[in-house]
Image (cartoon, rainbow, N blue to C red):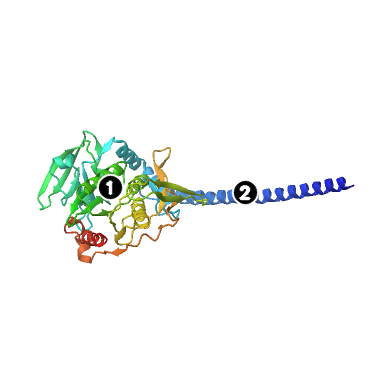
């Protein structure tokens, strides 16, 4: 009798378990189905709206439509509309240029420039040794006023200027140039290979090592290690790392560079959309034990923020300057499309070694070093010796020297 009861109980439990499992499966399946249907409906609405606009414009627009421009603008608009401030669309031309620069097929003439807000010209910030620009006498502080006969003032931004300056090895670009003392020159520069350095170091008064990290690229880690070792060999007692205007685009390079300064431990993590947390790098036991300061500003972003935050959290470095950009995200590799265009989107959130994010808020400096209005207007005219923010960073780090 007891065996029959036990069998009946077992059968009942099994049926209940099957019913519960079926119910859960149905709930999950319905939820997935509803999400799929909702996604299909949303996409259908988007396509229908675009089709309506397209029909109206093509039936009534007087001006001639450039199909390539239209398609690129629609794609750019889509990226602007997804609520991701770091998403970017590359036209086929822009993506080809990006890949060409990365693989060496295309090259600059050896200058780092920015579109000057007051003159509208391309202000030369740096001239790289051994480049066509250096060999032709271009200097930092000068201006490029025209490229291949097109006035730089008509170019929309710095990216457009850089695009006009690049070319394949052996090709020529003609420029009009204002020297730092405002003498006008015209010259032809032949594209040729040269080394783009991202790290620049010098020993300042008080034996403070000043290291400017322009950007994080494939070679930055090795350049940085060499610069740090050189400064130590020259008797440095403290370090100032200048990360102003460094957008930190190559995240892995920033991690490698930070690793050389901080003690052993977790450097940074990333968090995916589903909440999964992944360690990005665990540092070895090599570290810089001297006092350190990181000079930052509102254009310090991404990997540069990660570097500064790691040094502050793990090595006690001071941050000097102004609040950073707050770009604490992990970006995808470019996804290329059938027409040669590409897109980059945010795929994760960056976290520091304590699991905290600076995304949106930025990093608040320990020592405020905001520029006055007059200092800001002279920002690109300062030298290392006359830059007031560098001076404040040096004073801050010297105060930490025992």
**In the image, 54: left or right of 194?**
right
Nearer the observer, 361 or 101: 361
Query: Element at badge 2?
Result: helix
Per the model, the C-alpha gap separating discs 1 and 2 is 46 Å
The disc placed on residue 160 is 1
**Spot occupied by residue 398 in the image (x, y as percentages of width and height):** 23, 60
Q: In this picture, is 21 found above or below 336? A: below
Image coordinates for residue 265, horizontal then vertical, percent: 41, 50
Residue at the spot 41% in from the left edge and 38% down from the top edge: 339
Using residue 378 as the reference point, say whether residue 296 is left or right of it: right
Density class for disc 2 (Cα within 10 Å; few <14, some 14-19, many ≥20) is few
The residue labelled by disc 2 is: 33
Numbered marks: total: 2
Q: Residue at x 22, y 62 (%)?
A: 395
Residue 238 position within the rendered picture, expressed as x and y whole percent measured from the top left: 24, 55
Please report contact status of discs 1 and 2: CB closer than 8 Å, yes or no. Answer: no
Q: Farthest front residue?
A: 402
Q: Is residue 230 left or right of residue 253?
A: left
5 vs 348, nearest the viewer: 5
Q: Is residue 103 left or right of residue 139?
A: right
Residue 381, horizontal then vertical, whole percent: 17, 57
Give the number of the disc on residue 319. none
């Amino acid at each position: 009798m007891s065996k029959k009861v036990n069998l009946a109980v077992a059968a009942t439990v099994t049926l209940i378990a099957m019913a519960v499992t079926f119910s859960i499966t149905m709930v999950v399946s319905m939820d997935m189905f509803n999400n799929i249907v909702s996604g299909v409906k949303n996409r259908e609405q988007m396509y229908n709206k675009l089709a309506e606009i397209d029909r109206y414009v093509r039936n009534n627009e007087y001006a001639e439509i450039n199909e390539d421009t239209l398609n690129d603008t629609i794609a750019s608009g889509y990226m602007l509309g997804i609520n991701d401030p770091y998403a970017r669309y590359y036209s086929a031309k822009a993506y080809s240029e990006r890949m060409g620069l990365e693989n060496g097929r295309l090259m600059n003439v050896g200058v780092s420039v920015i579109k000057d807000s007051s003159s509208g010209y391309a202000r030369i910030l740096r001239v790289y040794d051994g480049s066509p620009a250096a060999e032709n006498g271009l200097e930092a502080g000068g201006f490029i006023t025209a490229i291949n006969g097109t006035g730089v003032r008509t170019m929309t931004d710095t990216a457009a200027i850089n695009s006009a300056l690049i070319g394949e090895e052996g090709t020529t670009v003609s420029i009009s140039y204002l020297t730092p003392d405002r003498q006008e020159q015209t010259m032809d520069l032949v594209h040729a290979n040269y080394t783009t350095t991202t790290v620049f170091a010098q020993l300042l008064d008080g034996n403070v090592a000043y290291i400017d990290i322009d950007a994080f690229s494939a070679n930055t880690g090795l350049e940085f290690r060499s610069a740090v070792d050189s400064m130590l060999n020259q008797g440095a007692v403290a370090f100032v790392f200048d990360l102003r205007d460094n957008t930190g685009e190559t995240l892995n390079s920033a991690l490698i560079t930070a690793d050389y300064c901080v003690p052993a431990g977790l450097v940074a993590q990333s968090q995916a959309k589903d909440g999964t947390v992944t360690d990005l790098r665990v540092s070895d036991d090599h570290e810089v034990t001297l006092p350190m300061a990181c000079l930052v500003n509102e254009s310090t972003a991404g990997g540069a923020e990660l570097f500064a935050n790691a040094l502050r959290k793990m090595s006690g470095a001071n941050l000097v300057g102004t609040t950073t950009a707050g770009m604490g995200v992990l970006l995808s590799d470019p996804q290329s499309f059938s027409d040669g265009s590409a897109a980059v989107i945010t795929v994760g959130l960056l976290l520091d070694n304590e699991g905290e994010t600076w995304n949106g808020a930025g990093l608040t400096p320990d020592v405020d070093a905001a520029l006055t209005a007059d200092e800001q207007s002279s920002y690109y005219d300062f030298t290392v010796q006359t830059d007031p923010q560098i001076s404040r960073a040096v004073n801050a780090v010297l105060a930490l020297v025992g």
